[in-house]
Image (tube, grey):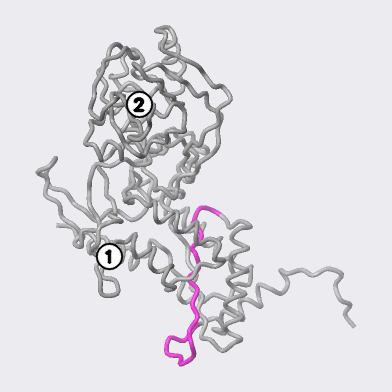
Amino acid sequence: MTSLAKTYNPQEFETDLYQQWEEGGWFRADAQSDKPSFTISMPPPNATGQLHVGHAVMLALEDILIRWHRMRGYEALWVPGTDHAAIATENVVLQKIQREEGIKDPRKELGREEVLRRIADYVVDSRDTIKNQVRAMGSSCDWSRDRYTMDPPLNRCVNETFSQMYADGLIYRGHRIVNWDPKLQTNVSDDEVDRKEVASPFYTFQYGPFQIGTVRPETKFGDKYVVMHPDDERYSEFNHGDTFECEWINGPVEATIIKDSVVDPSFGTGVMTITPWHDHTDFEIAERHQLDKEQIIDFQGRLLANAGEFAGMPIEEARPKIVEKLAAKGLLVKTDGDYVNSKAFNSRGGGSIEPQIREQWFIDVNKPVVPWKGEKRSLREILIAVVREGDIQIVPDRFNNTYFHWVENLRDWCISRQIWWGHRVPVWYRGEGDSAEIQIGVAP
């Protein structure tokens, strides 16, 4: 008689057992079934290596729901898949090449086709690893419907959707402020930005008759607008559009008074100068009042020629020298060395975000052109309505407030990137500048 092993060894049983499940079609859903349907589309893991404990939790919870609904008589479908994860995957592979082969700039030295080939090879291995890990979790998904977000049919859907949204006026190309990452040399979307609390000296400077505060003196070379709340009694003597001249970093400047309700009178002195090219809020103020916008920092994170003697310096090198010059002019009022502020970083590569104005492709979230329940509504309005009217239920409902805060503050969404891996914007250009001919959707 064989004795029972003291410990359970999953490798002895679970691989064979799962293979029996899969070959027997036990998890395959029948599209022709008369049973009530229940479907989960697996949030596809990024094809960047291996799953982590967060994925394990997700798989366990979804598997519980799927198996429970099968037992209750539903035709339960769990669709598995993997995400090509454009920015994250390209960054992982480029770093791997740099680390293992000593190639400083793989894109420059290897070229587009070779870099794409290496990423594709990496993804094949990564997807196999991920699918085996999902199977090892015992996940009861329908592998006959496995999808990869770069599969040709899905790429075709992306291109067709882009073309339709462009035709409907929901996608446009324009100059707007984006989240630029000088490290990875690409835009990233708002939900790819991580905000972290960092210690940064907060400087107060004398700017004509006003005192202004900032943690970023390196952006102040182009500041020629002073903004204050229209109801702030401290500055009632100043009118919108008034001008004055004052001494500044590289000599005298002429500044203009702007009254705008976005200013928080309780923050600092209640007055701020704006840098529309390098700050989202400042850009929106400039758009509302049709103000000039001037670039101060280039796309590599260095100061431009309008910074005078500081031109070509990286931000961190220039900042203390600019403060030193303003102090020498008697314009530094005080420094708060213990100040903590929220700074933006790229969640995909860790680099600091430097807002920049760039001509890019955007989704218009406010244009009321989408047919919805007999009306033409904007994407933002529909996103709000589907939850408020019960078409979509967020579980647990305490996250409703988080959702509404995000949607109600949604800006036009930048969808173009400066990377090689991933879906390409289906647009072709003939000629240059404003006279360029544009072909959308299919190659001319």
When the figure is inspected, residue 140 is found, relative to residue 366, above or below; the finding is below
Give the camera-side residue of 291 and 419: 291
Residue 234 spot, x, y in % from top left: 39, 26
Residue 340 spot, x, y in % from top left: 55, 31
Which image quarter is the N terminus in? bottom right
- Residue range in magenta is 29-49
Single out the mark in the foreground, 2 or 1.
2
Does residue 42 belong to the magenta stretch?
yes
Rounded to the nearest angstrom, the CA distance separating label 2 from label 1 is 41 Å
Does residue 68 belong to the magenta stretch?
no
Residue 261 spot, x, y in % from top left: 34, 39
Residue 227 spot, x, y in % from top left: 33, 30
Which quadrant of the structure image shows residue 256?
Answer: top left
Give the camera-side residue of 92 and 37: 37
| Residue type, mark 1 in image | Arg
Disc on the earlier residue, 2 or 1 = 2
Q: Which residue is mark 2?
A: 235
Q: Which residue is mark 1?
A: 377
Outermost residue to the left? 435
The crowding category of the residue bearing disc 2, from other C-alpha atoms within 10 Å (few below 14, some 14 to 19, many at least 20), is: some
The residue located at (46%, 20%) in the rendering is 204
Are dots 2 and 1 in contact, CB under 8 Å? no
Answer with left or right where residue 442 lies relative to residue 347.
left
The crowding category of the residue bearing disc 1, from other C-alpha atoms within 10 Å (few below 14, some 14 to 19, many at least 20), is: some
The residue located at (36%, 54%) in the rendering is 422
Answer with left or right where residue 290 lies relative to residue 40.
left
| Residue type, mark 2 in image | Tyr
- Indicate the secondary structure of the residue bearing disc 2: helix
When the figure is inspected, residue 60 is found, relative to residue 346, above or below; the finding is below
The residue located at (47%, 37%) in the rendering is 351
